[in-house]
Amino acid sequence: MALHDYPNIEKLFRALEAERDAILDEVAPLRAEYEALHQKLSPGNARLRELGKMMRGIEQPRMSQLCGELAQLARAAGGKAISDPLRNGRG
């Protein structure tokens, strides 16, 4: 289909719009429930965002640097296990 073939482009456009609208109609009840639940939980979400920001402020940027340095040391060791066996779960 050539770009200048306007009638076919318009037909395809309308078909795609109809498909989009059908999907939006199908999801509308779920979206309404989601929005209601979101409104109910929003006050807790604000505290979660605040706590996350506080944790990232403590962890970063040093945590990224440490992880990078640990990865470099692991590669330098040729893939051998160099971490403390009791702390292997914290990688």
Image: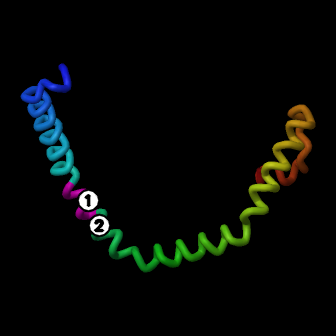
Mark identifier at residue 91: none
**What residue would you read off at disc 2?**
35
Q: Amino acid at mark 2?
A: Glu
- Residue that extends furthest to the front in the rendered view of this protein: 4
Vertical placement of residue 67 versus 18, above or below: below
- Image x and y of residue 84, in percent: 90, 50
Q: Secondary structure at mark 2?
A: helix
- Residue that extends furthest to the left in the rendered view of this protein: 7
**Region of the chain picked out in magenta, as a range:** 28-33
- Residue that extends furthest to the top in the rendered view of this protein: 1
Q: Secondary structure at mark 1?
A: helix
Classify the position of the N terminus by image quarter: top left
Q: Quadrant of residue 12?
A: top left
Left or right of 81 on screen, residue 56: left
**What residue would you read off at disc 1?**
31
Vertical placement of residue 78 versus 89, above or below: above
Viewer-proximal residue among 18 and 74: 18
What's the distance in space between the residues labelled 2 and 1, CA to CA?
6 Å
Q: Residue at x 61, y 72 (%)?
A: 53
Q: Residue at x 89, y 39 (%)?
A: 81
Q: Amino acid at mark 1?
A: Arg
- Image x and y of residue 45, in percent: 46, 73
Vertical placement of residue 24 versus 8, above or below: below
Viewer-proximal residue among 22 and 44: 22
Q: Quadrant of residue 80?
A: top right
- The reply to whether callout 2 and callout 1 are in contact (CB within 8 Å) is yes
- Image x and y of residue 75, in percent: 86, 36
Left or right of 71 on screen, residue 32: left
Left or right of 68 on screen, residue 6: left
Q: Residue at x 73, y 71 (%)?
A: 58
